[in-house]
Amino acid sequence: MRNRIVNEFGEDKLEHVITDKPFFYVVDYTERTDSERAVEVLDTFPIDIDPLVVNNPTILDTTTTIFKPQCFMDGGVELKQCEGVMYLTSNTPESWVVFIEIKDCKPKNASDYHQDIKEKFIVNVNLFRDKGIIPQDKVVYAIASFPRKGKTNFHNHFIKATEWKKFRDNHKIMIKGTNKITLKNEISVI
C-alpha cells in the first residue's frame, strides 16, 4: 500500500513510520509549536502532549503514513486532508486501513471541528478509492481523536448512531471518536 500511496502523491509529501511495538502513540504538535513540529508517531508515551494511544497486542508490523501540507492537490487547490493513514506494512486487500484525524484543541472547542473532520474522512477515503490505492468497496476505519478530552467518552457526542450508520452504509467508513484504538488482528480494529 505504501508504494501505491507514494506513486500517487510523491515521497516528498509523505512521511512513513513503521512500528511493531505493543503500544505506540500518535500526536499532533502543529498548533503547540507553530508548525515547527507536526504529526509524529512515538514508541514511548509522550509527557508533553496527550496522544492517540494505539494498542497493538498481537504485535502487528504497522505503517503510519503521515500526510504533509498540500499532499492532496486538485488543479492547484488543496483538498481537505486528515493527518494520515495507518495500515499493515505487509497488507492484503482484506487488511484493515485506518484514517486518522487528531484535534489538539480545548475540550470546549471540540464540537466546532466535528463536521470538518467527517468531511475530511469522506474526501480522503474517496481519493484513495479513486486513485486505486484501496478497493472501491473496501470498508475502512476512521478515527477522530480529541486527546485533551481524555477523561470523557465523546464518541456519541461526535457522531450520532443514525449518522454512524449512514457513514457505514453510504461511504463504507466505520467512524469513531476515541483516544484509544486496539489493532485486534490483521482484519479488525476496535
Image (cartoon, helix red, strand yellow):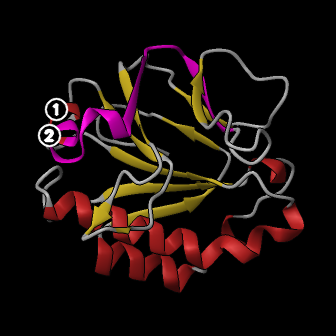
Determine whether the residue tagged by mark 1 lies in a helix, strand or loop.
helix
Apparent side of residue 147 relative to residue 188 in the rendered image (left or right): right
Q: Dot 2 corresponds to which residue?
A: 7
Apparent side of residue 31 relative to residue 167 in the rendered image (left or right): right
Residue 138 visible within the image: no
- The span shown in magenta is 5-28
Q: Position of residue 41 (x, y in %)?
A: 56, 27
Q: Dot 1 corresponds to which residue?
A: 3
In the depicted structure, whether residue 180 falls above or below residue 156:
above
Residue 17 drawn in magenta: yes
Dot 1 amino acid type: Asn
Residue 11 visible within the image: yes
Residue 114 drawn in magenta: no
Dot 2 amino acid type: Asn
Q: Position of residue 121 (x, y in %)?
A: 43, 65
Determine whether the residue tagged by mark 2 lies in a helix, strand or loop.
helix
In the depicted structure, whether residue 6 falls above or below residue 22:
below
Q: Which of 172 and 146 is in front in this view?
A: 146
Apparent side of residue 93 relative to residue 32 in the rendered image (left or right): left
Which corner quadrant holds the N terminus? top left
